[in-house]
Amino acid sequence: MESNSDLHCIMTAIIKNTTHQKYFCSKLILVKFLMMLLFVTFVFKANAQNPAPWKAPTFADTLQNPLVNDNPQNGKKVFMSICFVCHGEKGKGDGIASAQLKPKPANFTSDFIQNQSDGALFWKLSTGRGAMVSFQKTLTPIQRWQMVNYIRFLGKK
Ligand code: HEC
């Protein structure tokens, strides 16, 4: 928005000192303000519905999975009692509670998920974001690593 013309408008209003000019000038500024507000609201709403892809901090990549050789099926019970509601039984992000959610629960079979390190996935499910709550307190570290292994299992084609 151009503030020069607003300034010019105010100056003219002061110099001319006519009610008409003052009225016109305040209207102009008000309209500009409302347009700006509308624009900001629009951008904000668009962002809330489509936030940037979730990125774990780089240190998360250095977290070592202590259960690399564990049977991924050890995570099945927890997954099928909590995660499937949103992420779906096959991890495709199509669970029964997924319809109302924006952004959608992650699809664990996608490259976007499978290309991430174990540490990054562990960090995300421990930290949470929005509808994806933090599992730091509800699941033990062992259970959370088992979730990572189960996500890997779901991603196998
Ligand atoms: C209430 C619904 C809900 C439940 C229950 C849930 N999630 Fe999520 N999950 C989400 C949503 C929504 C996202 C996407 C969040 C975002 O991008 O802001 C997500 C994202 C994730 C991600 C990160 C994906 C990425 O962007 O890289 C992981 C990992 C994950 N969930 C694991 C789990 C695990 C494991 C469980 C069970 C212990 C679980 N979630 C339970 C809704 C849920």
Image: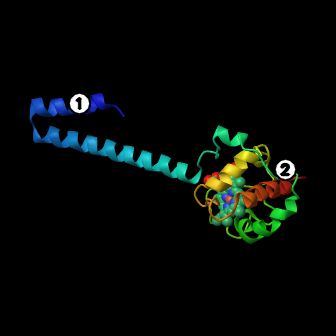
- Image point 76% across, 58% down: which residue? 147
Residue 51 located left or right of residue 93: left
Are the residues flagged by discs 1 and 2 in contact, CB closer than 8 Å? no
Tell me the SS state at disc 2.
Answer: loop
Residue 61 appears in the rendering: yes
Quickly name the residue at label 2. Answer: 68
Residue 128 x/y as whole percent: 61, 55
The one nearer the camera, 52 or 148, is: 148
* Residue 154, numbered label: none
* Residue 7, numbered label: 1
The quadrant holding residue 141 is bottom right
Amino acid under disc 1? Leu
Return the residue found at the far right: 157
For disc 1, the neighbor class at 10 Å (few under 14, some 14 to 19, many from 20) is: few
The one nearer the camera, 17 or 90, is: 90
Q: Tell me which label, 1 or 2, sits earlier in the chain.
A: 1
